[in-house]
């Protein structure tokens, strides 16, 4: 049964999230959970300073005589670029890695090179097998599930851990953060580490066999975490991270170029989030981003509502993106549009490992909390 439309009185999450529910004050579970979890994940005052100091000591101690003491992922976006700046300010010596999936915008590439050059950070690129990855992405698009970026998310994790192991680096510092990503409904973002789902979708819709793709599933996570002793840290959560202020600093000090919306450093991601997701799935990713910022005190609800009045995409840009993406995939624009227009589906419509992953991570949290 479809819910009557309702929107949270504190953030801007609404019933486009099928799992949303509200209390008597019309406050939704998304922002309530985000605020409560943030108190744990983002310590304040002296506790925060102590935590940062402890982490830096552990990272330096782990490197011994190694050339690098940590690995950071670089996308050319604000989060990862500001993270690189902070890591250097903390006196660490990182290796920066960019996972190249073939969709980088020109500005994103310029940002990566400019940030690394100005901070004197060594930079490496992990380039995916384009023909193979293109086929996987097209398979996901044909599957009609909302999580079309799962192959990229899994490849990033795989590339980071492979590279860390190669260079004997024990700490990967990620750019994920609660200030701008504290809210992300489960129905909008299923676990990207479900390799069974990836294989089942590729088997049904793909042409190529997967040979070179850097899988990262629960088995590999266990291997890298417990055998290779590689840890993932989200350092931005330990700072008062204001994205707009960070952007200004990057522009002034590191020659950063503002490319637009969140995750728009990728042409494909921009097109998915600004057009396909809202049109096909009634899912406006901006709601989650703005609601996260509201919870972090970085945006007012009224400001978010005003921004949401604008369409998430520009009609002229959509046609350009359709032409560009179709050409990259090697299919006609009519074929591409017919794929987009297929009825929406869920990852639950395909073989997946959800039940097993839920159980194994529940056990993990119980013993290693």
Image: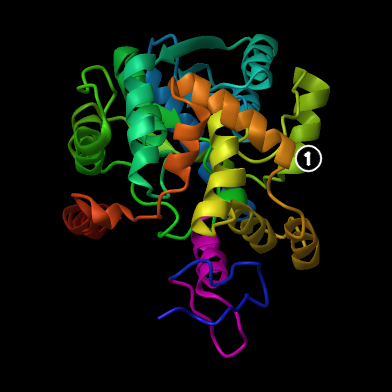
Q: Is residue 118 above or below residue 230?
A: above
Q: Residue at x 57, y 53 (%)?
A: 279
Residue at the farthest right position: 252
Q: Residue at x 65, y 17 (%)?
A: 106
Color style of the picture: rainbow
Q: Secondary structure at mark 1?
A: helix
Residue 3 visible, this angle: yes
Residue 103, percent across and down? 52, 23
Left or right of 27? Residue 261 is right
Q: In terms of image quadrants, where is residue 201?
A: top left
Residue 224, percent across and down? 24, 30
Q: Residue at x 17, y 37 (%)?
A: 219
In what quadrant of the picture does the C terminus appear?
bottom left
Give the residue at mark 1: 245
Stretch in magenta:
19-42
Left or right of 11? Residue 247 is right
Residue sitting nearer the eye, 145 or 35: 145
Residue at the farthest bottom position: 24
Residue 78 visible, this angle: no
């Amino acid at each position: 049964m479809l819910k009557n439309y309702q929107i949270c009185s504190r953030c801007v999450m609404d019933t486009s999230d099928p799992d949303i529910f509200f209390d008597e004050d019309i406050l939704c579970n998304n922002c309530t959970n985000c605020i409560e979890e943030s108190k744990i994940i983002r310590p304040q005052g002296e506790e925060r300073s102590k935590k940062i100091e402890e982490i830096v000591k552990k990272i330096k101690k782990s490197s011994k005589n190694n050339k690098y003491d940590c690995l950071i992922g670089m996308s050319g976006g604000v989060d990862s670029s500001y993270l690189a700046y902070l890591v250097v300010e903390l006196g660490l010596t990182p290796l920066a890695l960019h996972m190249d999936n073939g969709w980088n915008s020109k500005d994103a590439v310029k940002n990566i090179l400019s940030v690394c050059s100005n901070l004197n950070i060594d930079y490496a690129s992990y380039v995916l097998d384009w023909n193979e990855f293109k086929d996987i992405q097209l398979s996901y698009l044909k599957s009609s599930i909302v999580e079309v970026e799962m192959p990229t998310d899994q490849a990033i994790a795989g590339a980071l851990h492979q590279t860390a192991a190669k260079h004997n680096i024990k700490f990967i510092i990620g750019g994920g953060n609660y200030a701008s990503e504290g809210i992300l409904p489960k129905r909008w973002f299923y676990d990207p580490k479900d390799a069974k789902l990836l294989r089942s979708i590729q088997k049904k819709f793909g042409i190529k066999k997967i040979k070179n793709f850097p899988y990262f599933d629960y088995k590999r996570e266990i291997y890298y975490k417990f055998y290779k002793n590689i840890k993932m840290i989200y350092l931005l959560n330990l700072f008062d991270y204001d994205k707009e202020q960070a952007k200004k600093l990057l522009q002034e000090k590191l020659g950063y170029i503002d490319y637009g919306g969140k995750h728009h450093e990728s042409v494909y991601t921009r097109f998915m989030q600004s057009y396909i997701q809202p049109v096909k799935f009634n899912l406006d990713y901006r709601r989650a981003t703005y609601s996260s910022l509201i919870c972090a005190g970085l945006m007012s609800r009224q400001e978010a509502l005003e921004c949401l009045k604008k369409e998430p995409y520009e009609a002229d840009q959509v046609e350009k993106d359709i032409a560009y993406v179709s050409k990259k995939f090697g299919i006609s624009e009519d074929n591409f549009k017919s794929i987009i227009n297929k009825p929406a589906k869920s990852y639950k419509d395909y073989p997946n490992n959800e039940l097993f992953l839920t159980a194994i991570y529940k056990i993990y949290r119980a013993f290693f909390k």
